[in-house]
Structures are given as C-alpha cells and as structure tokens.
Image: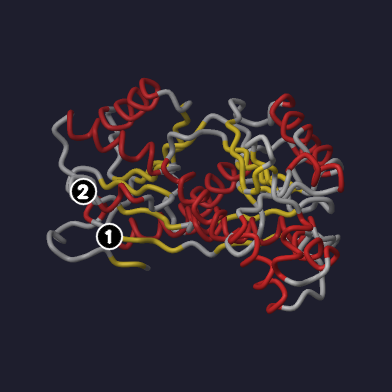
Amino acid sequence: MKSSGGGRPNRITIRDVAADADVSVAAVSKVLREAYGVSASMRSKVHSSMAKLGYRPHTAARGMRGQTFTLGLILPDIRNPFFADIIAGFQDGLEGTQYQALIGINRSTSMVEEGLVDSMIDRQMDGLLIVGANDHEQLIAIAQRKPLVTIGNHHASNEVYDTVNNDDDEAARLAVRHLVDGGYRNIAMLSLITDSTIIKERERGYTDEMNRLGLSRFARIVRSDQLQSSVQNAARAILTGPDRTEALFCWTDFIALQVIGVATELGLGIPDDVAIVGHDNTMYCDFGQNSLTSVDQSGRLLGLEAARRLIERIKGRQATEHYLVSPRLVVRRSSVRNILTEPAAAL
C-alpha cells in the first residue's frame, strides 16, 4: 500500500492497478465486475497486479455501484455435521470468482427470521442461499428482493427462485429396500416434528415402500423434536416396547448416532437386535464405533450446485431451475449382520 507524506498509508486504487497492469481503468472495472467478454489473459494480468499491489475492492463503494460480491448463506443449525458439507461445496462453487460467503444462523424451524434476511440485504449482499426453510410465501417474497436459491425445500412449482435438493422420497425407499433385503421386516422410522417438505418426502417414501413390499402392518413413524432428551426418549420407546422394532430408519445421521447410544445403553446388539440406518452420510458414519449405514445425498454437491445457480441468477438468468441429486446408500455394519471387516459398500 502506498504511503502519504505523513507516513499514513493510502489505499491502492483502481487507477494504480490499471497503471501497473498497463491497461485502462475501464478494463480493470470490467474484470472486477466479471463482465462478459473479458479475455482470460486480461483477467490474469489484472489479478496479478491486484495481488502485487495488495489491492482490495472497497465493498461499500462497490455496493453503491450495484454489487458487493458477497453472498449470504443462511443455515438452520451449525451442530449438524451435514451443514459443514454444504458449506464446503458452496465454497467450491465460489472458487475462481470474486464472491465471498457470509454465514448466518436461523433459529426458526420453518421460516427465516426476517431480521436476519433484512440484515443481509441491508449489507447489500448480491444473493442468498437459504437452507432448510419451507415457508413458500416468505421465500417468494425474499426472492423478489434478492436472487435466491434454496436447499431442503421441495416447492418446485415456484417461478422466482431455484431449488437444489436430494431426492428424499427415493432416499427413504433405498433404506427400506436395503433393510428388507437383509431380512428385516418390522422397520420403523424415527422422524422429525416439522412441516418441512424434505421430511414429508422421506416419510412418504418410507410409507409407500413399506406398503409396496407388503409390510404395511409394520409401518410406524415416530416423530420427535431435535432436543437430545426428546430423541433419546423416543428411541427408548421404540426399542423397549412390546412390539420392539427390528430395524430403524432415522431421518438424519445426527439422530441415528444418538439412537446407537441408546441401543448400546439398553444392551442391544447392532445390528443383531436392531439395525440402524441414517441419512446424510456424514464423516462420523465412518468412525469404527459407529459404522453407520447411511443414505448419501452429497451435501458437498448440493452446496456446489447451489453456488453455481446463485451466481447465474445474479448475472441475470430468469428461468427457474430445480436440481435434484440422486441418493445412494452406503452400507456399513449397523445394518448388515456378519460383516466385521469389509469396507463400506455403496448401493
């Protein structure tokens, strides 16, 4: 950074970058705006000068000109490790661009806190990715203010914002078919008390597949909130009742791992006494003490595709897109008898 006569550093300007790169100020501006038609060599030359001089675009000034190159990422929780995968994928999607993501945590289970959205819009963020919110009318209102992409929201009929999702119906069917193929019949589902469309899709897939396989008499959905005590109480009720289930499909790994703990406390063998299948295939599934079979919906891919679509929206795409990830089942010891040493297998 340049220094003034009094020793105070002056901010490097766009004119300094242009002079160093031997290009026009307009050319530097185009690179900064990621304008269409800028050649790769021009972009490389300008970025090299920016790095050499330590140039940092002034966010407030850029906002006044229409873009800040910041994106808001709103998550419902930071404890669930699946959201870390989404963040990693979102960052992958921003690589090679000027965009930076700023994260906000939403405490509501269905709506997005208006103060959080207003704060991001007031800071002139160029677009928003919202994970887990399902209030369709609210999301439409947000999309009318800023480019919007959502993850974990199956309102695919809208025409104003993009959605990126796992095929949650098929995910539940995969889990049921796997357990039935392993000889289990009395299969329950531990679900969430919510109006979330992703949970409704998983519940529908579970119920329909149990019915299709002639196991409707065993179909049972037990719902709980996400409090640890509530999950453990629900798991105990399922695992100690007179008609104790043989297998359990949990709506997320975060819950399935707690069920493994409860089953172990009760002295039940996994999977001999009860098989357990989770959803998300987070990193903790691979830990030896867990070895949790799980549906992989590729959080990293969801985040990557969401970032790409959000940038396209910001750059002017109007047509709505709804991207669906095909799930796969990663099989481990928690659901298959007599596999003590084999590595995880994907189905």
| Residue 275, horizontal then vertical, whole percent | 26, 47
Which class describes the residues within 10 Å of circle 2: few (<14), some (14-19), or many (20+)? some
In the rendered view, tell whether residue 156 sits above or below residue 108: below
Q: Based on the displayed image, in which of its 4 quarters is residue 177 positioned?
A: bottom left
Q: Position of residue 268 (x, y in %)?
A: 16, 37
Quadrant containing the C terminus is: bottom left
Residue 109 appears in which quarter of the rendering? top right
User: Which x, y percent locates residue 25?
Assistant: 83, 63
Q: Please state the horizontal and vertical placement of residue 34, each as a whole percent of the image.
A: 76, 64
Residue drawn at x 82%, y 41% as measured from the top left: 140
Check disc 2 and give the amino acid type. Pro
248 w.r.t. 135: above or below:
below
Which residue position is annotated with label 2? Answer: 271
**88 displayed left or right of 100:** left
Q: Which residue is at a point 43% across and 57% down the rendered structure image?
A: 296
Residue sitting at x 42%, y 51% = 215
Residue hosting label 1: 182
Q: Helix, strand, or loop for circle 2? A: loop
Q: Is residue 262 above or below residue 93?
A: above
Viewer-closest of 40 and 52? 52
- Label 1 SS: loop
Pointer 1 local density, CA inside 10 Å: few below 14, some 14–19, many at least 20: few
Could you tell me how far apart the alpha carbons at marks 2 and 1 are, in whole angstroms?
10 Å
Q: Amino acid at mark 1?
A: Gly
> Of circles 2 and 1, which is in front?
2
- Counting residues from the start of the chain, the first of labels 2 and 1 encountered is 1
**Contact (CB < 8 A) between labels 2 and 1?**
yes
Nearest to the observer: residue 74 or residue 323: 74
Q: Report the colour scheme.
A: secondary structure
